[in-house]
Image: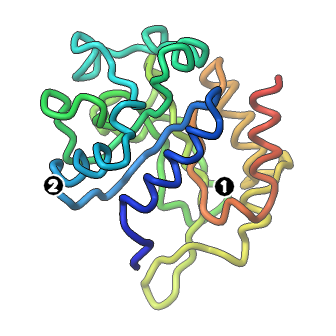
């Protein structure tokens, strides 16, 4: 599916950051295809290279721990208010502000087909011990698939329940609270389908407010 050009999407991000000088944005691009030079050119042409956060070189390759990240206030004061992760193709020695996802983030399992399968344990990068919560950013996958004739597709009919703020098994609210308890801190990111359905933003507010 063609969702539009990368440059067009980045221009939207640039306009938002220009209009909201105290906001910080994180982008995660998965299943990346184009060469790194294409990404770098898109960031340069939109001016987002100048707004992007770049970790110290000593913190690359998995050495960036939670306490090493700047605060939002730090990022606002330095005007480095965009953090970008690529799931593949990153090379921080060449483009230091396009970060390799698996050096900074762990994520939970995905491909869920039953509401009782949501987990908080690290599933990727695959070399992590799933019984240990590492000192890195956390991404909680919370989306449901259905199957038809062996083909898996996003379960849109169940989205209001999947993204609900309640505390029943399979609901986003329950999953969020459970992972917060397991991690002993707020999860950093939630990855959803159909985020405009259900109560995803209520869950986000609850996580940030308490």
Determine whether the residue tagged by mark 2 lies in a helix, strand or loop. Answer: loop
Q: Nearer the viewer, residue 177 or 115?
A: 177
Residue that numbered label 2 is attached to: 35
Q: Is residue 86 left or right of residue 28?
A: left
* Residue found at the very far right of the displayed protein: 166
Residue that appears at 36% across and 31% down: 50
What mark, if any, has residue 200 been given in the picture? none
Q: Is residue 132 among the parts visible in the rendering?
A: no
In the image, is residue 181 above or below residue 163?
above
Q: Is residue 21 left or right of residue 53?
A: right
- Graded by Cα atoms within 10 Å as few (under 14), some (14 to 19) or many (20 or more), the crowding at tag 1 reads few
Marker count (numbered): 2
- Residue 111 screen position, x and y as percent: 47, 61
Residue that numbered label 1 is attached to: 116
Residue that appears at 70% across and 38% down: 176
Identify the mark nearer the N-term, 1 or 2.
2
Q: Nearer the viewer, residue 28 or 5?
A: 5
């Amino acid at each position: 599916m063609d969702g539009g050009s990368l440059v067009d999407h980045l221009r939207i991000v640039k306009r938002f950051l220009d209009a909201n000088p105290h906001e910080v944005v994180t982008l995660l691009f998965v299943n990346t295809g184009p060469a790194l030079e294409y990404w770098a050119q898109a960031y340069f042409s939109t001016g987002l290279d100048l707004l992007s956060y770049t970790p110290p070189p000593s913190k690359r390759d998995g050495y960036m721990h939670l306490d090493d990240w700047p605060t939002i206030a730090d990022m606002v004061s330095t005007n480095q208010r965009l953090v970008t992760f690529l799931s593949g193709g990153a090379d921080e020695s060449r483009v230091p502000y396009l970060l390799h996802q698996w050096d900074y983030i762990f994520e939970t399992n995905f491909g869920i087909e039953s509401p009782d399968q949501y987990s908080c344990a690290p599933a990727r990068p695959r070399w992590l011990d799933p019984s240990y919560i590492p000192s890195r950013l956390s991404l909680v996958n919370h989306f449901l698939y259905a199957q038809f004739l062996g083909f898996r597709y996003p379960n849109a009919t169940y989205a209001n329940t999947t993204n609900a703020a309640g505390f029943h098994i399979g609901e986003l609210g329950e999953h969020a609270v459970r992972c917060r308890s397991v991690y002993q801190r707020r999860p950093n990111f939630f990855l959803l389908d159909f985020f405009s359905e259900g109560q995803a933003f209520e869950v986000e507010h609850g996580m940030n407010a308490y």
